[in-house]
Image: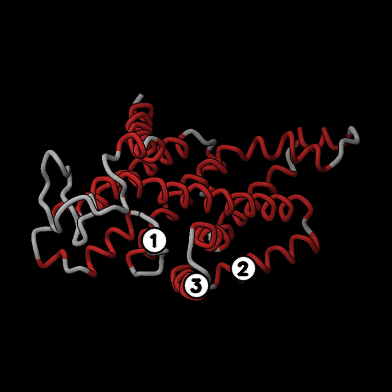
Amino acid sequence: MKNKAIGIVGLVLIAVIACLAIFAPLIAPYDPNAVVGPSYAKPSAEFLLGTNDVGYDIFSELVYGAQYSLLVGLTSAAIAAGIGIVVGVLSGWFGGAIDSILMKITSFFITIPYLPLVIVLTAFLPKGFISMSLILGLVSWPEIARILRSQTMKMRSREYILSIQAMGVSHWYVIRTHVIRELFPLVTYQLILRIKSSILSEAALSFLGLGEPTIKSWGSMLYYAQAKDAFMTDAWLWWVIPPGLCIAVLSFGLMLVGYVVEGNMNPEMEAAV
């Protein structure tokens, strides 16, 4: 019952942010890239969160920023999970030379510090949604692969799997219909973790000025607030706190849902994470 309540709270928090992103054109009162008022206007009925140094409506920026932050999180997590599933399952199931080669590649990526690698790649590659999603996805899969490999190796020796194989069923059929299905809770948990880490990473990179400056995101809002010395005035109250709070709320919601998913896994899989 407790886990159910925690999960509901997490889903509600995620749903609120998702609604902002999905219905942004209906919720945002202004074009986030249009000058609609005086600089540094304080929150009012006309401008719910005031305006920035240029005169953009901060609430509209916040709403549209949810789109980019969520899309980057979902896309990069899907890329990481896809690569992790392929590498981890193939390595754990077939073993031998395939396992050796794939695990050496995985170990190589694991040894490279995550944040410095992401910063270097983001600094030198073209900026934008596709490159940001690819970078975060391509550096996040090794841990998923390592965990899924371990579980696949254990599943391979189970009696019911051996019985199915004894019937002459192909490896791909067993992997597709049994292994992937058994790993689904673990994959879901890892996917949630990657969404959360990707959203935080995107925000951090954008805050450092490594994101696409023309795209509205919560991280870019924080970057421009810092660059325009919002902390030197009371503008930080409506320019910095809202995007920071949105990042925290979404991360907390994902953490709660991840906690429930982890609690519903069988003990063997729970030990793997």
Side (left or right) of 87 relative to 250: right
* Residue type (three-letter) at the residue carrying disc 2: Ser
Which residue corresponds to the image point at 29% horizontal and 44% vertical from the top-left? 249
Q: How many marks?
A: 3
Which residue corresponds to the image point at 17% horizontal and 42% vertical from the top-left? 48
Q: Secondary structure at mark 1?
A: loop
Q: Residues within 10 Å of mark 3 (few under 14, many from 20)?
A: some
Q: Secondary structure at mark 3?
A: helix
Side (left or right) of 32 relative to 240: right
Q: Is residue 256 visible?
A: no
Which numbered disc, 3 or 2, marks the residue closer to the eye? 3
Q: Disc 3 marks which residue?
A: 117
Circles 3 and 2: CB distance less than 8 Å? no
Q: Secondary structure at mark 2?
A: helix
Q: Is residue 154 visible?
A: yes
Residue 187 image position (x, y, % from top left): 57, 43
Side (left or right) of 242 relative to 136: left
Q: Residues within 10 Å of mark 2 (few under 14, many from 20)?
A: some
Which residue corresponds to the image point at 83% horizontal and 43% vertical from the top-left? 171
Alpha carbon distance from label 3 to label 2:
15 Å
* Residue type (three-letter) at the residue carrying disc 1: Thr
Quarter of the view holding residue 134: bottom right
Q: Disc 1 marks which residue?
A: 214
Tell which of 79 and 93 is nearer to you: 79
Please, which colouring scheme is shown?
A: secondary structure
Residue 238 image position (x, y, % from top left): 16, 52
Q: Disc 2 marks which residue?
A: 107
- Is the residue 201 above or below the residue 118 in the image? above
Which residue corresponds to the image point at 44% horizontal and 69% vertical from the top-left? 115
